Amino acid sequence: MNITDVRVRKVAKEGKMKAVVSITIDDEFVVHDIKVIEGEKGMFIAMPSRKATDGEYRDIAHPINSQTRERIQNIILEKYEQTAAEEAAVAEAEA
């Protein structure tokens, strides 16, 4: 499995959620609404989820093992940091 595209949409409002991401796997399958969240121990991702009838949130799509989750998270957070740095450079150039 190769992640062939990562699209980051930063969230403008204040709060713990910093961005919403879509990933494309092998140029054939897309997963939307992966959230980039700033937690107490640093940034992490939350997979797309839905609120169940019991009030709990359950992932709609998720990696089967921790190695795959870590690989996806590293790729997404790297792209998020790259996007944030590019936006900061543009803002600085315009100032």
Image: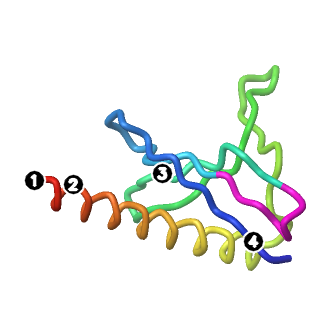
In terms of sequence position, does the residue under pointer 1 or pointer 4 come before the other? 4
Q: Which numbered tag is attached to residue 3?
A: 4
Q: Which numbered tag is attached to residue 95?
A: 1
Residue 12 appears in which quarter of the rendering? top left
Residue 4 appears in which quarter of the rendering? bottom right
Q: Which is in the foreground here, disc 3 or disc 2?
A: 2
> Rounded to the nearest whole Å, what is the CA distance between mark 3 and mark 4?
20 Å
> What residue is shown at x 40% (from left), y 64% (from top)?
41
* Mark 2 residue element: helix
> What residue is shown at x 66% (from left), y 74% (from top)?
70
Q: Are marks 1 and 4 in contact (CB under 8 Å)?
A: no
> Which span is picked out in magenta?
22-29
Crowdedness near tag 1: few (<14), some (14–19) or many (≥20) residues, C-alpha within 10 Å: few
Crowdedness near tag 4: few (<14), some (14–19) or many (≥20) residues, C-alpha within 10 Å: some
> What residue is shown at x 16% (from left), y 60% (from top)?
92
Q: Which is in the foreground here, disc 2 or disc 4?
A: 2
Q: Position of residue 7 (x, y in %)?
A: 60, 56
Q: Which numbered tag is attached to residue 37?
A: 3
Q: Residue furthest left?
A: 95
Q: Which is in the foreground here, disc 3 or disc 4?
A: 4
Q: Amino acid at mark 3?
A: Ile
Q: Kindly identify which residue carries mark 2.
A: 91
> Rounded to the nearest whole Å, what is the CA distance between mark 2 and mark 4?
29 Å
> What residue is shown at x 40% (from left), y 44% (from top)?
16
Left or right of residue 59: residue 91: left
- Viewport quadrant of the N terminus: bottom right
> Rounded to the nearest whole Å, what is the CA distance between mark 2 and mark 1?
6 Å
Q: Are marks 2 and 1 in contact (CB under 8 Å)?
A: yes
> Rounded to the nearest whole Å, what is the CA distance between mark 1 and mark 4?
35 Å
Q: Amino acid at mark 1?
A: Ala
Crowdedness near tag 2: few (<14), some (14–19) or many (≥20) residues, C-alpha within 10 Å: few
